[in-house]
Amino acid sequence: MIPAAFAAALALSTAAADLATPMPWEPGVISGPVHDAAPAFTPDGRTVYFGRSVGEGRPYPAIYVSRRVAGRWTSPEIAPFSGRYGDMEPAMSPDGAFMIFISNRPQRPGEPMLNGRYAGKDWPEGGGALWRVDRTPSGWSRPTRLPDALNISRSTFAPAVAADGSLYFMRPSEPSGRFHIYETRYRDGAYEAPRRMPFSQEGVSDVDPAVAADGSFLVFGSRRDPDIAVGSMDLFIVFRRGDGDWGRPVHLGPRVNAKGSDAEPRLSPDGHRLYFSSERLATDKPRNDLGWNNGKYNIWTTPLPLAVLARLKAESIRP
């Protein structure tokens, strides 16, 4: 019998060891004293939308926007379509034409905000549904709710959009309440019925998909593989095979993953940089419970070199 420690070592990705140590992204500007997550960039990389949790005198999370001007990111402001309800997890289409986000806002005027249920608990006003805003000559359109076939769960979260319109998201299964990742293809102006991703099975929790623009790979958070886990939630990558099916998830290693939770991954417009939220502390800065380095979710980033992606793909799709 192979000792558990040795088996875990065999399971570790050799390619992931070549990923650079992540750095905090825009600390004190984008990454602040409350939870910040899910940066969604315009195609030119000069505008970013992201989610910020309750705090700063606000009762609900909201989506913020910052712009890069003269080499610096501006102080974030609440996006024009957000701020009244609980909004989070913006996902930009690769062409910048629309954005999908999560909200607990009422489906129809006069109805209550959406309640959620997952992990065996009820979450008053903590539900989520998929909503969309479109780019217009005068700015973003009014939000519209995506079809009921996609929003069958009142706890639908974490959208990601590929260039062909395919949409990825997470929702819980019953009776376990664990989250799994779903894919829906966009064909002939409509979404197909969502299907659970083949690698996202009962018995594990998979969350927060981020998809490459061409749909060739996903980065996501998971509690799978406890023998190689670094924190309570770790990041994995999985690649699509040549036949269209998906390979096996590959752990992104102990540089990307740290003690605590690492989740809410996002990709740069070119797919060559990973952004994610982490509870880790910056080791070269003193802890500051009133500032950004306080153990709450901050946004961290690391490059995804093409050579490393190629090696991770080989690990993911090998027979």
Image (tube, helix red, strand yellow):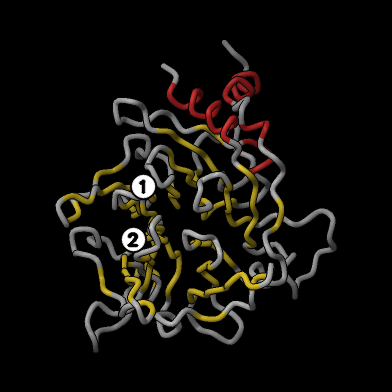
- Per the rendering, the mark at residue 156 is 2
Q: As drawn, which residue projects farthest toward the top?
A: 1
From the image, which quarter does the N terminus lie in?
top right
Residue lying at 70% horizontally and 40% vertically, measured from the top left: 20
Q: Could you tell which of marks 1 and 2 lies nearer the N-terminus?
A: 2
Q: Is residue 265 visible?
A: no
Mark 1: secondary structure: strand
Q: Quadrant of residue 57?
A: bottom right
Pointer 1 residue: 181
* Identity of the residue drawn at 43% across and 29% down: 248
Image-based side of 225 in relation to 126, left or right: right
Is residue 301 visible in the rendered image? The answer is yes
Q: Residues within 10 Å of mark 2 (few under 14, many from 20)?
A: many
Q: CA distance from mark 1 to mark 2?
A: 10 Å
In this view, the residue farthest toward the left is 188
Q: Position of residue 143 (x, y in %)?
A: 31, 76
Drawn side of residue 23 relative to residue 263, left or right: right
Picture quarter with the C terminus? top left
Q: How many marks?
A: 2
